[in-house]
Image: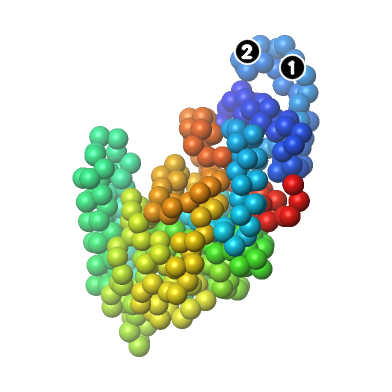
Amino acid sequence: MNQCFQLQVQAIIATSFRQRHFSFSSRYTASRVSFSSFCCGRNSEMEEVKVASDFLVGDPALLEKKIDAIRSGGPQKLQVIADFDATLTKFSVNGTRGQTSHGLLQQGNPEYDAKRQQLYEYYHPLEFSPTIGLEEKTKLMEEWWGKTHALLVEGGLTYESIRQSVANANIAFREGVSELFEFLEERDIPVLIFSAGLADIIEEVLRQKLHRSFKNVRIVSNRMVFNDNGSLVSFKGKLIHSLNKNEHALDMAAPVHERFGDMDGPTDDNASLKKRTNVLLLGDHLGDLRMSDGLNYETRISMGFLNHNIENSLSCYREAFDVVFVNDAAMWGVIKLVSEICSSGV
């Protein structure tokens, strides 16, 4: 991001948070900066403004109304829906692009790793092609995911390979994720983690990186079936890919703390999830806003993590999400908002 645009972002953020009643901004430490006009060539100094460097809000008044509405419903009506890769996990890890839950997998067979990479190189551009219609693109994504899953079975993937892949992966959670899950667990607020990847890998990342499980966290993703020798033999349930991960929330979700393979269908908790009609949605792509499409919600607060291409995407994200986080921000802002929602004060 060039320096001139960085200053524009800072100015937008500062303007967004000068609302006295909007206490959500108080969690962040503001810094004072002095900068010239938005045209980089001009030298005229503008007054110093306080800048929150990690997030901005497009419509603070609307967000305040949503907070009040969800607060009035109480924690018993709230659920959290979150994307996994680059939302719960960091975009940049140790100075390089962090790996995704799907991309980190090495199945211990170089031939099949190469074949999966070839599929990625062919289908990934098609996923984001502006010239391919949704119906055709959906068929292409089903092909991609189906072929990839077949290669994992054919190539003899073992659960031990998943453990080793996660242990060697360049992946990390955003600071504050564990604290957020704990806060929600204490209040019996469910968390649905949506992913077009692999549930078993996500569970292993949670185990190795957070070193604990959470009874309120459920995975909405593709789940593997292993035999007694720990080898992958099949996948269970419906195929979830990047364009349909909103459709199977209640019939694919399985608690993280359950043993692998024990959840064959909808659980008793699914009926209660449908009654939780207030939603906090976390995502890093505009398409993640569709994760709540299958839910008949009353009020939704959406929080977007804009990780790259900020200059070209900020305006769209600001219009689409209630809150936008930049600079690979931690989860403290989300915790602050949830704590306000769960408070009894006005």
200 sits left or right of 48 in the view: left
135 sits left or right of 280 in the view: left
Query: In the depicted view, which residue is nearer to us: 168 or 213?
Result: 213
Marked residue nearer the N-terminal end (2 or 1): 2
Name the residue rendered at 70%, 17% in the picture: 36
Q: Is residue 101 above or below residue 280?
A: below
- Place of residue 83 in the rendered image (x, y in percent of width and height, measured from the top left): 48, 54
Judged from the image, the secondary structure of the residue bearing numbered disc 2 is loop
Name the residue rendered at 64%, 52% in the picture: 72
Pointer 2 residue? 41
Q: Residues within 10 Å of mark 1 (few under 14, many from 20)?
A: few
Query: In the depicted view, which residue is nearer to us: 89 or 294?
Result: 294
304 sits left or right of 137 in the view: right
* Amino acid type indicated by mark 1: Met
> Do we see residue 291 in this rendering?
no
* Amino acid type indicated by mark 2: Gly
Q: Residue 322 sits in which quadrant?
A: top right
Name the residue rendered at 67%, 15% in the picture: 37
Pointer 1 residue? 46
Give the CA separation, mark 2 to mark 1: 14 Å
For the view shown, which residue lies furthest in the bottom direction? Answer: 228
- Place of residue 143 in the rendered image (x, y in percent of width and height, measured from the top left): 22, 56
